[in-house]
Image (cartoon, helix red, strand yellow):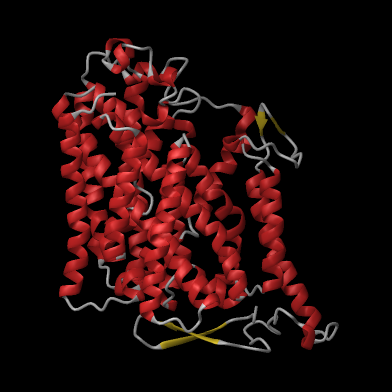
Amino acid sequence: MAVNVPGLIAIIVFYLVILAVGLGAAWYQKRKGVKEDVESIMVAGRDIGVFVGCFTMTATWVGGGYINGTAEVVYNPDFGLLWTQAPFGYAISLLLGGLFFAKKMRSEGYVTMLDPLQNKLGRVMGVFLYLPALLGELFWSAAILASLGKSLTVVSGLSDDIAIIVSACIAILYTLIGGLYSVAYTDVVQLICIFVGLWISIPFAFTNEAVGSIVESAKSNSSWLGTWDTNYTGSWIDSALLLIFGGIPWQVYFQRVLSSDSAKHAQLLSFAASFGCIIMAVPSILVGAIAASTNWSNTSYQEGLISPSANNETSAILPIVLQHLTPPAVAFVGLGAVSAAVMSSADSSILSSSSMFTRNVYKKLIRRKASSKEQLIVSRVAMVIVGVIATVLAIKINSIYALWYLCSDLIYTILFPQLLCVMYFDPNTYGSIIAFVVAAILRIGGGETLINFDPFIPYPGNSPTSLNFPFKTFSMLVSLILLLTVSYFVRALFTGGFLDPRYDILKCRLASGGRSIEQKEDNVSTPNGVENVAYDNSKL
């Protein structure tokens, strides 16, 4: 494919805008006298107000994977709008997160999502729980970078690999320098670019002579509305619940919560972002409907081939529509703005993963006496490593929407029960270990068609042609029940004298609200600067 010089220039201009905003935000904070330390990098000094907060919280999910993936599934004749669950699932997730987690987490003054888990369950268990969180962030970053690669390839003629690598390098650069300040302020530009770029393009796509009526297309056999397949009812329910509850325990979400200037605002931002997710999905849904209603043989797409789906390019349907159904000038504006904007979502996941590693693995387990400067260095090295891994995944994995589901799977089945219990109940490390292992076995045992991994647990109703048993939700519920029952049962054995507390190798808490036999204080700064003393329940 020949390089499209005007398109490439448009991409460069938009990229420079995003880079300038990210670097400018970092410079502005330093000019204000904000001290460059771990807390300013990870939670922006807890100084994000309502205006910027609404944008950055919405950008928790609205990025390249979100807008490209939504258009992809609406257009795909095997799915359609009925199976496009992510926009609605994540919107409900933000609503529930605001109701039950945001205010509570911000009031406690935590720095990462793993802090309450590690304080309650011990340092080593916190590291194990970091693994599903890390995988989720890596897959999410890869989804964003993959969507960028598709967009840039269409508009500029560059190869996918080059587009992905360049995008990743720019995102890593300003995140290294500005941390969450740069992430938050580029999010403002990101959402504005997505909204304006897509809505400018849609009227031109609608009026293209190759596009038929989306109303008539909805009534056809290959309707973009989708059809209900009773053989996959359980799978639909499973996926919906996965997105709703699996969308809560993400550091990329809680870093916004914990950076808010107050607990009340943290809750408010979650509610606003829930509404924003639905609004931002509308243009992508329309793009998918337009693509499904287009006679592609009357377009310039690959010299009039039948359709993008015939060429296995459904994941690139949004940039294809903008490139081939709108005038060149409009296409450059739409694709350039969207491509540059969605790049800024990758920075959030890169920052999230590195923050959890630096604080919850390096500082609390490897080097407990690490200075703030040392943690900053470790955080930046981790950002580069995470960015490189996400880039490789983006190059190797095809479907953007497939990555979405992989993102939330382990987080839903393993991490959600742990966070819920730590916040509202009194689990211990014994229950946590059992729940972790069993949930992983049950989930992996169900197999994964996206990576051609065959199941080894014969769940009822599941076969190569039917997925009617919600085994992911089943795995989560079993994990939740085991976490509580094992925790309280083991505690009862020690408090009832059946087991000698001196042999409690995991230092199980002897009573609800009580302290472990051996404690180690861990000072966590609170919003008002007062030290909030929390306790590790394990010397592991």
Left or right of 41 on screen, residue 516: right
Q: Is residue 456 above or below residue 102?
A: above
| Residue 167 placement, left or right of 326 | right
Give the residue displayed 42% in from the left and 43% down from the top. 143
**Quadrant into which the C terminus falls:** bottom right
Figure check: 8 above or below 142: above
Q: Residue at x 34, y 23 (%)?
A: 291
Q: Quadrant of residue 316?
A: top left
Above or below, 378 against 242 in this view is below
Residue 171 percent location from the top left of the image = 30, 53
Q: Quadrant of the N terminus?
A: top left
Q: Residue furthest right?
A: 498
**Image quadrant where residue 183 sits:** bottom left
From the viewer's perspective, tell me whether residue 120 is left or right of residue 89. right
**Residue 73, can we see it?**
yes
Quarter location, residue 452: top right
Q: Of residues 174 and 458, which is closer to you in this image?
A: 174
Q: Considering depth in this image, is 73 or 37 the residue closer to the camera?
A: 37
The number of numbered badges drawn on the structure is: 0
Residue at the spot 78% in from the left edge and 88% down from the top edge? 502
Q: Position of residue 519 (x, y in %)?
A: 61, 88
Can the viewer see residue 88 in this picture?
no
Looking at the image, residue 286 sits to the left or right of residue 510; the answer is left
In the rendered view, tell whether residue 493 sits above or below residue 381: below
In the rendering, at what x and y percent does residue 268 appear?
A: 34, 63
The spot of residue 512 in percent (x, y) is 66, 81
